Image (tube, rainbow, N blue to C red):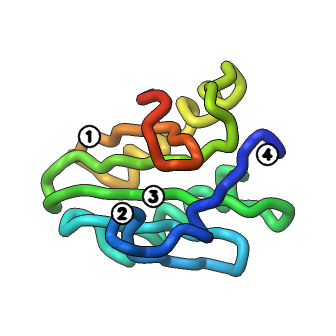
């Protein structure tokens, strides 16, 4: 996944990114809000390992957030480009169905973020 550049691991966990869950040294799932837990972060990490986003040859981070246990879950990916290519968009669109299975009965929204955590695109 050479087209991804993640910097969330160097951003302070000041409440903007959330609490880090690190399944290994190169990957982090940040969870934020009362609607997601460390267990949810672990399940998301497992999903992305199986999906091929968390590999031994890349560093990648994800942010999940939800206000309450019944609210929608937002999933954000930091990409290193100020624009979104069709390849990047398709890759994460394809992941959305699998993410939905992790949060049954709750809507899942997927976002691509720039290096400043500004939303580039909702998928």
Circle nearer the N terminus (1, 2): 2
Q: Position of residue 8 (x, y in %)?
A: 57, 62
Residue labelled with disc 1:
107
Q: Is residue 39 visible?
A: no
Above or below 65: residue 108:
above
Q: Which mark is residue 33?
A: none
Element class at badge 1 = loop
Residue at mark 4: 1
Q: Nearer the viewer, mark 4 or mark 2?
A: 2
- Is 26 placed left or right of 16 in the picture? right
Q: How far is disc 3 from disc 2 in space, using C-alphas?
A: 10 Å
Asked which quadrant contains residue 79, the reply is top right
Q: Are marks 4 and 3 in contact (CB under 8 Å)?
A: no
Q: CA distance from mark 4 to mark 1?
A: 27 Å
User: Answer yes or no: do the residues labelled 4 and 1 have beta carbons within 8 Å?
Assistant: no
Q: Nearer the viewer, residue 36 or 105?
A: 36
The residue mark sitting in front, 1 or 3, is 3
Looking at the figure, which quarter contains the N terminus?
A: top right
Counting from the top left corner in percent of width and height, residue 99 is at 44, 47
Give the left or right position of residue 120, taking residue 36 as reference.
Answer: right
């Amino acid at each position: 996944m050479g087209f991804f550049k993640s910097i969330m691991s160097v951003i302070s966990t000041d409440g903007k990114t959330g609490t880090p869950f690190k399944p290994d040294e190169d990957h982090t799932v940040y969870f934020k809000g009362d609607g997601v837990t460390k267990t949810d972060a672990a399940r998301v990490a497992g999903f992305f390992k199986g999906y091929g986003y968390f590999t031994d040859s890349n560093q990648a981070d994800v942010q999940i957030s939800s206000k309450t246990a019944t609210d929608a879950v937002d999933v954000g990916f930091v990409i290193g480009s100020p624009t979104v290519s069709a390849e990047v968009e398709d890759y994460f669109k394809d992941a959305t169905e699998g993410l939905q299975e992790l949060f049954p009965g709750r809507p899942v929204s997927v976002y691509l973020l720039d290096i400043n955590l500004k939303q580039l695109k909702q998928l």
